[in-house]
Image: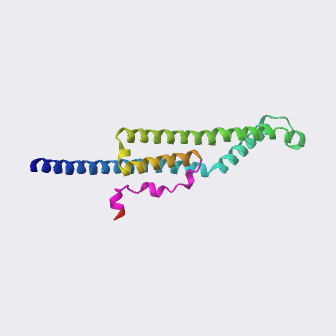
Amino acid sequence: MVASAVSSAVSIAAGEEQRQKFRRYVAEVATVQNRMMATRIDAMADHQKWHATYFFVTTFGTVGAMYGAMYKYGPRHFFKNPQLLHKPFGPACCIGVLFYMMIYHVRNVAMKARFWQMVEDFQRELKRVDAHHVPEGLHHMTMLETLLYEVKCDRSYFIDTSVLREPVGLFEEARK
């Protein structure tokens, strides 16, 4: 009777030790994943910050290139005739907006798609090791969903990435 009580106490202590090791492992994985996500979110926020610059550079660059081509290869008195001067302005602006869409928005969508794939991989890895059974894993999976929602709504520049770069600790240590 005493031997079985001692063996069950030892197995409980060993089980608790294994659980603490697993919780530390999940916290380390969460820290690494957070840092990787912070890098990607910073890149997306930096890209989204320059949307007006992309727009004006592509639009005015296209109009300037069109007027340069008309000066070099166009009809003779192109810049003296106002009717000739205004004709190609509309199509050139449309082409500039098209370049803006191709350069800015396609790059933004590609960056978001890479981020979504990375978050899905992180979630799959955490579910594979059953990290949702410990508080650290559950918190990290919830945070992944929140970040994914924020990025899908194009609000990556509102995310404080300095918090993501801090190491994730165990919840009992944080409460003390």
Residue shown at 20% from the left, 51% from the top: 13
| Residue 147 picture location, percent across and down | 51, 49
Scheme of image coloration:
rainbow
Q: How many marks?
A: 0
Residue shown at 78% from the left, 34% from the top: 73
Residue shown at 41% from the left, 47% from the top: 33
Membership of 127 in magenta stretch: no
| Residue 128 picture location, percent across and down | 36, 38
In this rendering, position of residue 36 left or right of residue 85: left
Q: Residue 168: tell me if it is visible.
A: yes
| Residue 145 picture location, percent across and down | 49, 46
In this rendering, position of residue 12 left or right of residue 88: left
| Residue 157 picture location, percent across and down | 56, 53
Q: Nearer the viewer, residue 104 or 83?
A: 104
State which quarter of the image contains the C terminus: bottom left
Q: Which residues are magenta?
A: 154-174
Q: Residue 81: tell me if it is visible.
A: no
Q: Nearer the viewer, residue 134 or 153?
A: 134
Instruction: Tell which residue pokes out farthest to the bottom in this image.
Output: 176
Query: Is 160 situated above or below 126?
Result: below
Q: Nearer the viewer, residue 38 or 152?
A: 152
In this rendering, position of residue 29 left or right of residue 15: right
Membership of 166 in magenta stretch: yes
Residue shown at 85% from the left, 43% from the top: 79
